[in-house]
Every structure is written in C-alpha cells, then in structure tokens.
Amino acid sequence: MSIRNRLGRVVRANRAERAARRQGPADPVQAVEAAYAQQVARLDQARRSVADLAANRRRVEVLGQQARAEVEHWDRQAEAAVAMGHDAGAREYLRRSIEAGKRLEGLAAQHRTIDEQVRRLEQDLVRLDHQVHDSFVRFQALRADHGAAQAALQMREATAAAGQQAAGAQAAALEAEREVRRLQARAAAYDEIAGTDPDSARVREAFEQLESEGEVRARLEALERRRGIERPRQ
C-alpha cells in the first residue's frame, strides 16, 4: 500500500473519530465501524513504523559494510607499507584501520539493537494484523445480523400496520353497512307512507269511508236538532 493511501486511511479514521465525539452516542454498528477504522489506522501506523525502522537498519548495515571495507583497505595499506619498510606510513594506516574498526563495532552494536526492535515490532505487527482481521470478520457478521434484524423489524412493523389498517377498514365497512340499512329502512318507510298509489282501490275505499262517515254524522245531528236533543260536546 502506498504512503498516500495509508495517510488517507489515517485521515479518514481521525475524521470519523472526531465526528463521533461531536455527535455523541451513535448507532452501535457505526460505533463498531468507527472502532474498526481506528484499528486499521493504528495498523497502518505500526506498519510505517516498522518500515521506517527497517530502513534505518538498512542504512546502518550499509555504513557497517563501508566501515568494514575501510578496515580491510587500511590493513592492506599497512601491510604494503611494512613490506616496503615505511614504518611511519604503516602506523598511520593502522591508526585509520583502528578508527574504522571502532566505528564498525559501534555500527554493529547499533545494527543489533535496531534489528531486535524490528523483529519485536514485526511480531507485534503480526498479532495486530490478526486482531484487525478478527475485528473485520466480527464487524461484517455484526453488520449482517444488524441488517437482518432491522429488515425483520421493519417487516413486522409493516405487518402490524397492515393489520391495523385492515381492522380499521373492516370497522368502517361494518359502519357503512349499518348506515346503508338505516337509510334503506327510512326510504322504505317513506315509500310506505308517501309512495302509495292515490288511485288504488284501498285509497279510494278509505276516502269513501271518510266521506260517508261525515255525511252520516251531519244527518244525525240534523235529526237530533229537530227533536230537540242536544249532543254532548266532545
């Protein structure tokens, strides 16, 4: 992974962390996702640290190789000077060889220290990588379970709402049926009262009875007046 991509992941993780702090308590799945993003950022940071330390180890190793080459070079020069009888030159070459040797010893000790650090960090990096992978697997499983639970809950809520709507519709239908029956009964009553045919035999008979009763009553009252009989007032 390039340095640019690593830095981008770190920046995104930091933004997610700051956003979570500003927003306060978030959805549990989002909280787990933010924690996983932080783990990934820490893993990338650890990888960069190991890479930087390994680069330093390589630089020390190169310097050590150069120091060793200098020791060998000054030793050969000293041997050649001794063979030629140049004691003063041999002493100078040996002095330089000793200085290069001391520098080589320091670089070797530094290389061992850095190498131990790199090995420890690499082991820690392997463990951290496994932890991040396990966290990723758990996060994916949690997100899948959360999505399934949300879908099931939404389905149950929709089913319950549909049931309530059906019950309301059924109650409204029953009320409408009762209203229809009431209106039909009222219409039938009006038909019975006002819808009768005025030319029917039953209606004519009723009118004839009323007329004959009125005529009979009038004649009876006339006879009673002639006989001087006064009818009691009703």
Image: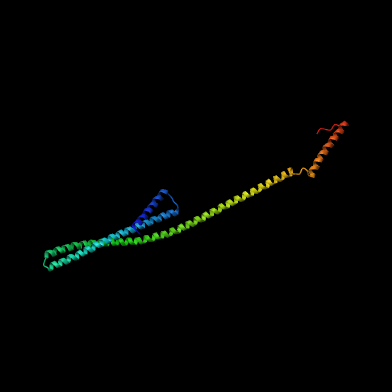
Residue 208 drawn above or below residue 32: above
Residue 211 drawn above or below residue 30: above
Residue at x 22% of width, y 63% of height: 66
Residue at x 21% of width, y 65% of height: 69
Question: In the figure, is residue 234 to the left or right of 1?
Answer: right
> Which quadrant of the figure has residue 61?
bottom left
| Residue 68, horizontal then vertical, whole percent | 21, 64
Residue 131 drawn above or below residue 161: below
| Residue 36, horizontal then vertical, whole percent | 40, 56
Taking the view exactly as shown, the residue that stands out farthest to the top is 228
> Which quadrant of the figure has residue 87?
bottom left
| Residue 125, horizontal then vertical, whole percent | 35, 60
Residue at x 79% of width, y 44% of height: 202
Q: Nearer the viewer, residue 197 or 182?
A: 197
Residue 113, visible in the rendered structure = no
Residue 136 drawn above or below residue 225: below
> Which quadrant of the figure has residue 156?
bottom right
Location of the N terminus by quadrant is bottom left
Question: In the figure, is residue 177 to the left or right of 63?
Answer: right
Query: How many callouts does the rendering have?
Result: 0
| Residue 151, horizontal then vertical, whole percent | 50, 56
Residue at x 16% of width, y 66% of height: 77
